[in-house]
Image: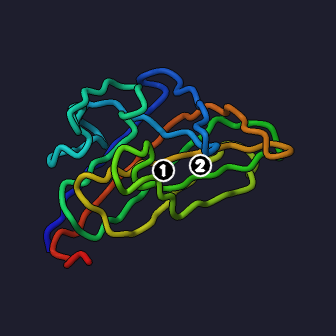
């Protein structure tokens, strides 16, 4: 069975804080630099700054996209570390097909997860599986909510986002 893999990593310690800005859906599309090394791996150019006829530069919104290189069964995974914050917050994450509405597929969120905070830092991992297609990007979106569902701009410390595509799967 063949795999096509894209592995992205962003760390505040290397590039400075990633300011959380909320889109109209109440979530932030996490951005990733266009580099290789450590956990960054992109042999199939799924996180290429020149996609769909547009040139992107980190940290613009398109730097949050993985463009699947093959039709197949995609395994999406993520790791998110938030800075410790006040008690009573709710931490959310979701995977989204076409998070910027760039294609006919349109925005399609799946696997939304929410957690109450624990003492200390907020460290979470996420995983979801779904069919993926070239031309339909995927992204990781996060949100932190306070009292009355208020959106809080809690800084991110470290985020990893990975897509592994099983290319031998017959896609419907």
Circles 2 and 1 in contact, beta carbons < 8 Å: yes
Characterize the local packing of mark 2: few (<14), some (14-19) or many (20 or more) Cα atoms within 10 angstroms.
some
Left or right of 69 in this view: 151? right
Q: Judge by depth and name the residue closer to the eye, 150 or 117.
A: 150
User: Which residue is identified by label 2?
Assistant: 123
Hey, which quadrant is residue 165 in on the image?
Answer: bottom left
- x then y, percent, for residue 123: 59, 49
Residue nearer the viewer, 36 or 107: 107
Tell me which residue sits at (74%, 44%) in the image.
145
* Between 122 and 20, the one nearer to me in the picture: 20
Q: Quick one: SS at disc 2?
A: strand
Disc marking residue 79: 1
Q: Position of residue 56 (x, y in %)?
A: 30, 27
**Alpha carbon separation for disc pair 2 and 1:** 8 Å
* Residue at the (61%, 31%) spot, across then down: 155
Q: Secondary structure at mark 1?
A: strand
């Amino acid at each position: 069975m063949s795999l096509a893999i894209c592995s992205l990593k962003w760390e505040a310690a290397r590039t400075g804080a990633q300011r959380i800005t909320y889109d109209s859906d109440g979530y932030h599309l996490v951005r990733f630099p266009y580099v290789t090394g450590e956990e960054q791996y992109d042999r199939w150019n799924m996180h290429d700054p020149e996609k769909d006829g547009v040139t992107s530069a980190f940290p613009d919104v398109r730097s949050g996209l993985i463009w699947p290189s093959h039709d197949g069964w995609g395994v999406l995974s993520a790791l998110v570390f938030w800075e410790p914050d006040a008690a009573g917050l709710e931490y959310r994450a979701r995977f989204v097909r076409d998070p910027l509405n760039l294609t006919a597929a349109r925005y399609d969120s799946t696997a939304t997860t929410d957690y109450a905070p624990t003492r200390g830092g907020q460290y979470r991992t996420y995983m979801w599986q779904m069919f993926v297609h070239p031309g339909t990007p995927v992204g990781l979106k996060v949100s932190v909510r306070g009292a009355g569902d208020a959106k809080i701009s809690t800084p991110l410390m470290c985020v990893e986002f990975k897509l592994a595509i099983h290319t031998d799967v017959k896609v419907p």
